[in-house]
Image: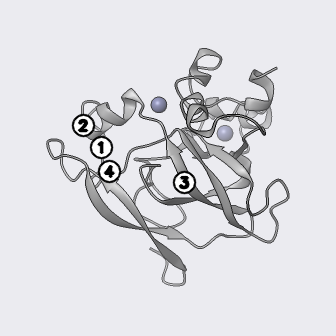
Amino acid sequence: MLDSMQTSNAKSYAVQTATSPLAPFGIKRREPGSKDVEIDILFCGVCHSDLHTGRNEWHNTIYPFVPGHEIVGRVTRVGGSVTKFKSGDHVAVGVMVDTCRTCPNCQAGQEQYCLSIPVSTYNSEDKILGGTTFGGYSSSIVVDEDFVFRVPAGLDLAATAPLLCAGITTYSPSGTGRLDQTTK
Ligand SMILES: [Zn+2]
Ligand SMILES: [Zn+2]
């Protein structure tokens, strides 16, 4: 972790080994940077990937592991350069929280096909805070606004969560895709 990095405490459910159950676990979230959105998590879907990763069935799990990449919540704080969201907005986060931003696929708005491999919402190297990324089985998360989606007014928030991975896979299998294109 960067010595100067400000953090806040969050609650989560984590698995500590491939055979242990989910259990309460304290984690750190970074203070929102200039382009970050801090989200109070209200709902999180359960994806089959959560189970495979938790049980290390894909042989790449870093423990402790906090699952969850079908996240719906409410914005609590935003960084000074955030333009798309404000406190109180209902928002969602899917399977990735960053990409290289510069490869042809990222430039084309197809970040799920990033040639450098996207930073996954969980079980990826956390390049900002250090350690690994922790998912949505938690009380809060901090994500760059470019990887946060607006939840349209009137949608049932709990029913929206599975759209962020399982649902969107119907349209663009490698990731969350772009809700603004795929919901037309
Ligand atoms: Zn999933
Ligand atoms: Zn890229």
The local secondary structure at tag 4 comes to loop
For the residues bearing labels 1 and 3, Cβ distance under 8 angstroms? no
Quadrant position of residue 46: top left
Q: Quadrant of ligand 2?
A: top right
Q: Mark 4 vs ligand 1: CB under 8 Å?
A: no
- Amino acid type, residue under disc 1 in the picture: Thr
Q: Which mark is residue 41?
A: 3
In percent of the image, x 30 and y 50: which residue is there? 62
Q: Earlier in the sequence, mark 4 or mark 2?
A: 2
Q: Residues within 10 Å of mark 3 (few under 14, many from 20)?
A: many
Q: Is residue 95 left or right of residue 152?
A: left
Q: In terms of depth relative to the viewer, which is nearer, 130 or 51?
A: 51
- Amino acid type, residue under disc 3 in the picture: Ile
Q: Mark 3 vs ligand 1: CB under 8 Å?
A: no
Q: CA distance from mark 1 to mark 3?
A: 23 Å
- Amino acid type, residue under disc 4 in the picture: Phe
In percent of the image, x 36 and y 51: which residue is there? 66
In the picture of the structure, the residue carrying the numbered disc 2 is: 56
In percent of the image, x 24 and y 30: which residue is there? 57
Tell which residue pokes out farthest to the bottom in this image: 4
* Residue 96 image position (x, y, % from top left): 57, 42
In the picture of the structure, the residue carrying the numbered disc 4 is: 65
* Residue 80 image position (x, y, % from top left): 80, 72
Tell which residue pokes out farthest to the left in this image: 19
Q: Earlier in the sequence, mark 1 or mark 3?
A: 3
In the picture of the structure, the residue carrying the numbered disc 1 is: 61
